[in-house]
């Protein structure tokens, strides 16, 4: 079973999602029903923050002095392979999600970002066109499953 710890770093998140921990828990219960994600127990952290912190993290870890919507920090530890696996951390910017939601829906935009980050933690990337297509299909599969 996959689980996530949610760390709230920016107060405005609670204006949109009353209890982010419960929201993510409900989504993961549904996600765990998908055959694709039933394998081993996995855990990760979602860090809900703002543009300022995202810029700082992006600069520190990717040497890019700009804000971004989502960052993933995979933690690869092969030693506990049969136990609960810690995948890593995902950081998400409130302002970017909120801005995108003006033309969409805050929850859908948020789900897109944490799913994208989660797939990165699982080892997916979008450096090549074929990998981008594969990752996008997985993202859409999950989103369609959530919102059907």
Image: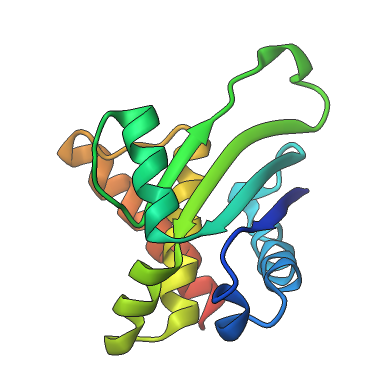
Q: Does 31 appear above or below 132?
A: below
Q: Residue at x 47, y 45 (%)?
A: 119
Classify residue 127 as left or right of residue 120: left
Q: Residue at x 31, y 30 (%)?
A: 62
Q: Residue at x 46, y 48 (%)?
A: 117
Q: Name the one closer to the observer, 130 or 126.
A: 126
Outermost top residue: 79
The image quarter in which residue 88 lies: top right
Residue 139 position within the rendered picture, expressed as x and y whole percent measured from the top left? 41, 59
Q: Residue at x 39, y 78 (%)?
A: 98
Q: Which colour assignment does the render follow?
A: rainbow
Q: Name the one closer to the observer, 109 or 102.
A: 102
Classify residue 134 as left or right of residue 46: left
Q: Does 103 appear above or below 100?
A: below
Outermost left residue: 129
Q: How many marks?
A: 0
Classify residue 42 as left or right of residue 59: right
Q: Name the one closer to the observer, 18 or 34.
A: 18
Residue 85 position within the rendered picture, expressed as x and y whole percent measured from the top left? 73, 30
Q: Does 80 appear above or below 54?
A: above
Residue 56 position within the rendered picture, expressed as x and y whole percent measured from the top left? 39, 42
Q: Name the one closer to the observer, 3 or 16.
A: 16
Residue 114 position within the rendered picture, expressed as x and y whole percent measured from the top left? 50, 58
Q: Does 54 appear above or below 18?
A: above
The image quarter in which residue 20 lies: bottom right
The image quarter in which residue 105 lies: bottom left
């Amino acid at each position: 079973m996959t689980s996530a710890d949610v760390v709230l770093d920016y107060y405005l998140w609670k204006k949109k999602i009353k209890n982010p921990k419960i929201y993510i828990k409900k989504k993961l219960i549904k996600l765990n029903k998908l055959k694709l994600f039933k394998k081993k127990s996995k855990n990760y952290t979602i860090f809900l923050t703002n543009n300022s912190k995202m810029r700082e993290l992006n600069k520190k870890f990717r040497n890019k002095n700009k804000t971004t919507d989502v960052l993933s920090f995979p933690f690869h530890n092969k030693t506990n392979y049969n136990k609960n696996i810690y995948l890593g951390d995902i950081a998400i910017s409130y302002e970017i999600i909120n801005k995108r939601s003006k033309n969409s829906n805050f929850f859908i935009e948020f789900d897109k970002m944490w799913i994208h980050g989660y797939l990165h933690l699982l080892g997916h990337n979008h450096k090549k066109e074929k990998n981008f297509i594969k990752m996008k299909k997985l993202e859409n599969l999950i989103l369609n499953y959530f919102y059907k």
